[in-house]
Image: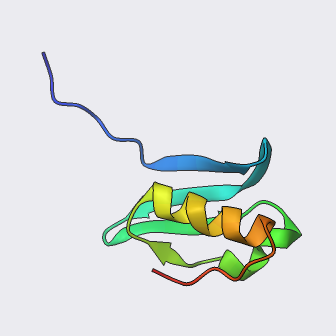
Amino acid sequence: MGAAIMSESYIIEVSSRAAGIVVRDRTGFRFFAAAPQFFRLEGQLFRTAREAERAAARFADGREAKPA
């Protein structure tokens, strides 16, 4: 049995709508917005894909997201 392979990118969805994607780099996951509502997250680096998902959810709820 081989080692588990982790994905290099993930689609981030909020309320069943695409918010953006995150792509793994050396230090975490970089966010790329798919909709204008999430442009303020563009280029932000998150430690995990889950952190990026939570930040996008805060934006969808009308709350500010804090960079990781």
Name the residue furthest right.
36
Residue 25: % across, % down: 38, 65
Residue 24 falls left or right of residue 52: left
Q: How is this picture coloured?
A: rainbow
Residue 25 to residue 8: above or below: below
Residue 4: % across, % down: 23, 31
Residue in the foreground of this view, choosing between 27 and 53:
53
In terms of image quadrants, where is residue 5?
A: top left
In terms of image quadrants, where is residue 54?
A: bottom right
Residue under the point 47% across and 56% down: 49
Residue 47: % across, % down: 38, 68
Name the residue furthest top.
1
Residue under the point 16% across and 30% down: 3
Residue in the foreground of this view, choosing between 40 and 58:
58
Residue under the point 12% across and 15% down: 1
Residue 13 to residue 41: above or below: above
In terms of image quadrants, where is residue 35?
A: bottom right
Name the residue furthest left.
1
Residue under the point 58% across and 58% down: 53
Residue 6: % across, % down: 33, 41
Residue 23 falls left or right of residue 56: left
Residue 62 falls left or right of residue 41: right
For the C terminus, the quadrant is: bottom left
**Numbered disc total:** 0
Residue 2 falls left or right of residue 39: left
